[in-house]
Amino acid sequence: MLTLASKLKRDDGGKTGRASGASDSTHRVSIRDRLLTKVAELEAHLPSTCKASFPDEDKLHHFQLAVSPDEGYYQSGRFEFEINVPEAYNMVPPKVRCLTRIWHPNITETGEICLSLLREHSIDGTGWAPTRTLKDVVWGLNSLFTDLLNFDDPLNIDAAEHHLKDKEDFRKKVQDYIKHYAR
């Protein structure tokens, strides 16, 4: 299997290339160059409820996404996600974590996310594939607040059971979390 790391080694021709004190940004220049077109495509196709930001423009492989749903339980909240694109992208999915504390059946309070396209291996065929893009990841994260909100296959079982037992109290708890953590 060809990965970006193996291609770089092959293209380097076995040269040592990096000095022992080389920085992460120097090491990741090739992935930065590769991501330039992907980032431009991503920014051109962001949903209106999303905003991407790059804390360090020399590290395009590490960025944040803010999702501000305009409908449903999570309307009026602003939820921050951290996205790290590994060197082996697009053979492996980006690593994504929710930075905002949230009461959600598919996101734990510690930021783990249950979204099939972020799974490297999936038996149902909906996991990561090399044909997927960062745009797919963004749209998937955005959809976790609307049409991909899944109470039947939860990661946060307590939130899903809460919704099943008392939808109105679930809504109140979501709004309480938004008030305290997602503004």
Image (spheres, grey):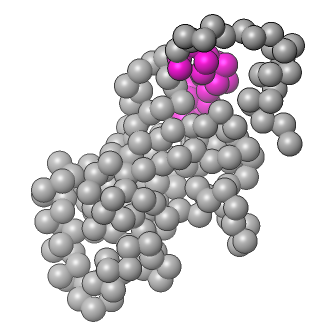
* Percent x, y of residue 3: 78, 36
Q: Is residue 14 above or below residue 88?
A: above
* Percent x, y of residue 145: 38, 62
* Region in magenta: 24-42
Question: Is residue 37 located in the magenta-colored stretch of the structure?
Answer: yes
Viewer-nearest residue: 51 or 95: 95
Task: Tally the numbered discs.
Answer: 0
Q: Residue furthest bottom?
A: 165
Viewer-nearest residue: 127 or 111: 111
Is residue 120 at all visible to an observer of this figure? yes
Question: Is residue 122 located in the magenta-colored stretch of the structure?
Answer: no
Is residue 72 at all visible to an observer of this figure? no
- Residue at 45%, 76% (x, y): give it: 154
- Residue at 39%, 64% (x, y): give it: 107
In the visual, does 24 lie left or right of 112? Answer: right
* Percent x, y of residue 109: 30, 63
Q: In terms of secondary structure, what is the magenta stretch mainly? A: helix
Q: Where does the N terminus fall, quadrant-wise?
A: top right
- Residue at 19%, 83% (x, y): give it: 168
In the visual, does 53 lie left or right of 39? Answer: left
- Residue at 42%, 68% (x, y): give it: 106
* Percent x, y of residue 83: 47, 41
Q: Residue furthest front?
A: 20
| Res. 50 image quadrant | top left
In the visual, does 130 lie left or right of 154? Answer: right
